[in-house]
Amino acid sequence: MCRHLGWLGREVSVSSLVLEPAYGLRTQSYAPRRQKYALLNADGWGVGFFDGAIPRRWRSAAPLWGDASFASVAPALRSHCVVAAVRSATVGMPIEVGATAPFTDGHWLLSHNGIVDRHVLPATSSAESVCDSAVLADLIFARGLDELGAVVVEIGNADPHARLNILAANGSRMLATTWGDTLSVLHRDDGIVLASEPYDDDADWDEVPDRHLVEVTPDGITMTVLKGP
């Protein structure tokens, strides 16, 4: 129950992706337009970007709309690859920085938009939080991102009520899944945006069908059907 966004392309400012668009993540933190399962995303936010091959993160457990410090710095943060998210916490899950995407294994940045029963996830985990998204991210990192589609299908089979929209990037490659929630793609002249919902009213946004795996590389974008029940 979150909103997230990924960018792969030429170097751009973080602000141009997250704060400046009319319906960007800052607006989606208090007035999402396509969110089905919550009205607010006020339980934290995170922005991850690549500094060369190194993933950097700025996260908070407070609402994005009130963070003046980030708003003042975001125009100066520039990267060719960005993963950002605003969070609406699953009921019963902690509101803390460690529960806030993007998560990282030191190579990938990963966000989870959705919900999953903790009982279908590993009982022990090295994740920095006990929240469902953090433990799921830790499982995906352990299996490897090449297995992302298989992990999503397995978890989806084990928990029929799960929503498993994942967004991950490693600086040269971006992966996403649709499983129970929305995702849109925008092809720009300077790169590709994947987002839970469009950040503007550009007619070039396309909706990704449910239960698909999306892969973005410098060569383009491919989609694969995820087969489940």
Image (tube, rainbow, N blue to C red):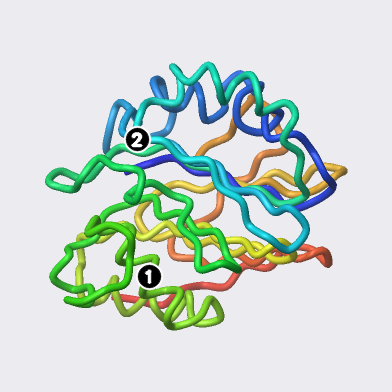
Q: Name the residue under label 1.
A: 138
Nearest the eye: 205 or 112 = 112
Q: Which amino acid does label 2 sit on?
A: Ala
Q: Please, what secondary structure does the residue beneath circle 2 have?
A: loop
**How packed is label 1: few (under 14 Cα within 10 Å), some, or many (20 or more)?**
many
Indicate the position of residue 190 as horizontal and vertical percent values: 85, 44
Indicate the position of residue 29 as horizontal and vertical percent values: 42, 26
In the image, is 4 to the left or to the right of 96? right
Residue 113, above or below 58: below
Q: Mark 2 points at which residue?
A: 61
Q: Which amino acid does label 1 sit on?
A: Asp
In the image, is 166 to the left or to the right of 117? right
Residue at image position (42%, 57%) is 165
Q: Which numbered disc, 1 or 2, marks the residue that appears first in the sequence?
A: 2
In the image, is 199 to the left or to the right of 139? right
Query: Residue 223 bears which disc, if any?
Result: none
Nearest the eye: 206 or 71 = 71
Residue 131 sits in which quadrant? bottom left
In the image, is 109 to the left or to the right of 206? left
Q: Can residue 101 be seen in this view?
A: yes
